[in-house]
Amino acid sequence: MKRYSAFAIAREAFRHHSGWERAWRSPAPKSKYDVIIIGAGGHGLATAYYLGKNFGITNVAVIEKGWLGGGNTGRNTTIIRSNYLQDPSAAIYEKSRSLYETLSQDLNYNVMFSPRGVLMLAQTQHEIRGYKRTAHANALQGVPTEWIGPGRVKEICPIIELNGPRYPVLGGLFQERGGTARHDAVAWGYARACSDMGMDIIQQCEVTNIRTSGGKVVGVDTTKGAIECDKLGGIVAGNSSVLADMAGFRLPMESVALQALVSEPIKPAMDIVVMANTVHGYLSQSDKGEMVIGGGTDGYNNYTQRGSFHHIEETVRALIETFPMLSRLKMLRQWGGIVDVTGDRSPMLTKTPIEGMFMNCGWGTGGFKAIPGSGWAMAELMAKGESPLTDEFSMWRFKEGKFIDESVAAGVAH
């Protein structure tokens, strides 16, 4: 694999860009692999990458029924933060945030990580108490975050309206090293690195059945034929329950759509990410100038990847109180993603009742920020059978009552 650099760009400019290699190979599947990862999104590709980088396991296939990064990885609003209340959550998200900081150098691919800061607004007395509690917990966890007052909020985000008619801004929880990254680039960078290690990324290849023998996984049936494996990782976000059903067990989760939209591009107006959980909306500005707007999940189970007008109306109406300038912008496009939500709004990185089969799912609305840390932890779990980052995230915690309740702690799981 040729390294990308300023010199390479200059060299190719003189050659009319004729010398660039394909970023990753598109091979036909082999008959058997040591490990098969189902799902070529960010989490699946990161898992494959760290299997190779950290454990030398490179006889790996990453199977994707659509196109690489075409699921939730390419449909999110790119927020990266780690200021969670519960210790297991803070540990894996902070691992991920720290990996994001050097990811471009590690992959030799610009993922456009921008530590612009993430501000979570407190607009009720309940949120003030909750965020101050989180700030104290983060201090104990070693996660840099701070509580700030309304004056500081206005200073770092001048376009905000502090004295909204229903929900005035009373302060906020600010993580200065949080931010955003380019979602497509994260998937492409991991894919390029995996391919360079000899792994096979197989697109347009849908898994139709999981084959087991004596309670152990032995392979999968796909639209491109049967493929055998020693270990299998299911990392397919909102379709995780469908995959589990193929293997003969159930997961304690449900699938819903999460919607987002972007405005027409405008001149730079804000350089941080703002989340308003009371009205359930969040806002940032992309490098192209678009205002990226997201809201909550649909109130009913579904598998749609399209947006709906009522959700846009609900989200934008709420945000206009806090950001009046939004009322004058035109919407450019909208979309939806299928997210898998657990009862405690925390993920599952877990062994399953099938020996050799592992699942990474349940990230709900917070999956993108966890991609590097999730891949690191899942690779360790698959390679060694355990990982300190995944110990608390077993699927059996619901049976045992050991919830990691971020829904109550944070009020929102973004």
Image (tube, rainbow, N blue to C red):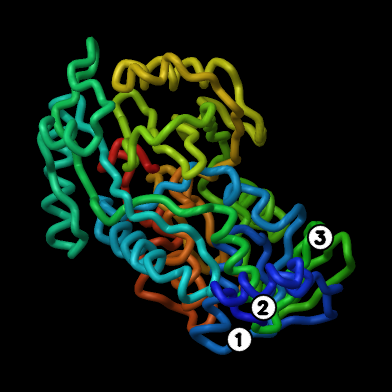
Mark 3: few/some/many CA within 10 Å (<14, 14-19, 20+): many
Residue contact at pointers 1 and 2, CB within 8 angstroms: yes
Question: To which quarter of the image does residue 65 belong?
Answer: bottom right
Of residue 91 and residue 268, the one placed in the foreground of this image is: 268
Q: Are the residues at dot 3 and dot 1 in contact (C-beta closer than 8 Å)?
A: no
Give whichever of discs 3 and 1 has the lower sequence position.
Answer: 1
- Looking at the image, residue 67 sits to the left or right of residue 173; the answer is right
Q: Seen in the image, is 414 located left or right of residue 261?
A: left
Figure quadrant of residue 15: bottom right
Q: CA distance from mark 1 to mark 2?
A: 8 Å
Residue name at image x 28 percent, y 59 percent: 90
Amino acid under label 2? Val
Does 156 appear above or below 388? above
Which percent across, then down, holds residue 26?
Answer: 80, 70
Indicate whether 304 appears above or below 188. above
What's the residue at 61%, 28% (across, down)? 333
The amino acid type found where label 3 is placed reads Cys
- Name the amino acid type tagged 1: Ile
| Residue drawn at point x = 86 percent, y = 70 percent | 226
The tag on residue 205 is: 3
- Residue 160, by quadrant, is top left
Q: Earlier in the sequence, mark 1 or mark 2?
A: 2
Q: Position of residue 24 (x, y in %)?
A: 72, 71
Q: Residues within 10 Å of mark 2 (few under 14, many from 20)?
A: many
Which of the numbered marks, if any, corresponds to residue 35?
A: 2
- The location of residue 249, given as percent across then percent down, is 63, 56
Q: Which mark is residue 57?
A: 1
Please, what secondary structure does the residue beneath circle 2 have?
strand
Quadrant location of the N terminus in the rendered image: bottom right
